Amino acid sequence: ESDVGARSTSSAARPGRAALAAADPRMVAPRLVGVDRAQQPFTLTAASAARLEGAGERDIYELAQPLADIALNDGTWWALSAQKGIFWRDEQKLELEGDVSVYQDRGYEFITERAQVDLAQREAHGDKPVKGVGPSSRIEAQGFRFVDKGQRLDFTGRTRLLLSDQKGAP
């Protein structure tokens, strides 16, 4: 429920509502559209965002259900989502945690528990176990990293790849 919009609902009619908003201001459905250093677009959205306590003058935000969409020069894109995240606006860095899902528009997807993303450099990495699927493969690894401005994905540590001739089946 939102207090913003066409309805004219008085906060006096709902005691405690204004105090909660003043104590914990949150942005609902924030959307940031930006470009990296090579002028390639990215979008960062979330269910909600709040400025991180103790951040001082820095723009650091806690995000609920963040989603980062990253477009690449070759026309493909990556989408990264998680249960929660922290975003450093000035540095354009994002830390994702909890059911991190990484999806590539060619049909590749993997899940991990944590990832660090540098939106300006188009780099990402994670050192938690990874499980993924592709059009004709399954993979398990100890981590991952995007290199070459997101053009290549490397799996790190001990890695197990199963290939098949059927879509998604080993």
Image (cartoon, helix red, strand yellow):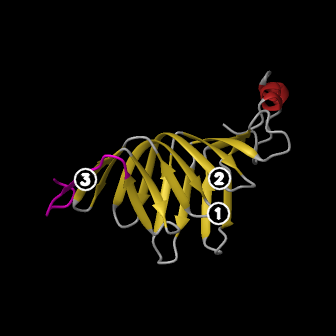
Q: Main secondary structure of the magenta part?
A: loop
Q: Which residue is mark 1?
A: 120
Q: Mark 1 or mark 3: which comes first in sequence?
A: 1
**In the picture provided, is 6 more to the left or to the right than 145?**
right
* Residues at discs 2 and 3 in contact (Cβ within 8 Å): no
Q: Which residue range is magenta in the image?
A: 156-170
Q: Where in the figure is residue 42, as x and y percent of width and height? A: 60, 64
* Residues at discs 2 and 1 in contact (Cβ within 8 Å): yes
Question: The disc labelled 3 sits on which kind of residue?
Answer: Arg
Separation of residues labelled 2 and 1 (CA atoms): 8 Å
Q: Which residue is mark 3?
A: 138
Q: Is residue 115 magenta?
A: no
Total residue callouts: 3
* Rendered view: 9 above or below 45: above
Q: Where in the figure is residue 137, as x and y percent of width and height? A: 23, 57
Q: Residues within 10 Å of mark 2 (few under 14, many from 20)?
A: many
In the structure shown, which secondary structural element does the residue marked by tag 2 occupy?
strand
Q: Which residue is mark 2?
A: 93
Question: The disc labelled 2 sits on which kind of residue?
Answer: Lys
Question: The disc labelled 1 sits on which kind of residue?
Answer: Ala
Separation of residues labelled 2 and 3 (CA atoms): 29 Å
Q: Residue at x 43, y 41 (%)?
A: 128
Q: Residues within 10 Å of mark 3 (few under 14, many from 20)?
A: many
Separation of residues labelled 1 and 3 (CA atoms): 30 Å
In the structure shown, which secondary structural element does the residue marked by tag 1 occupy?
loop
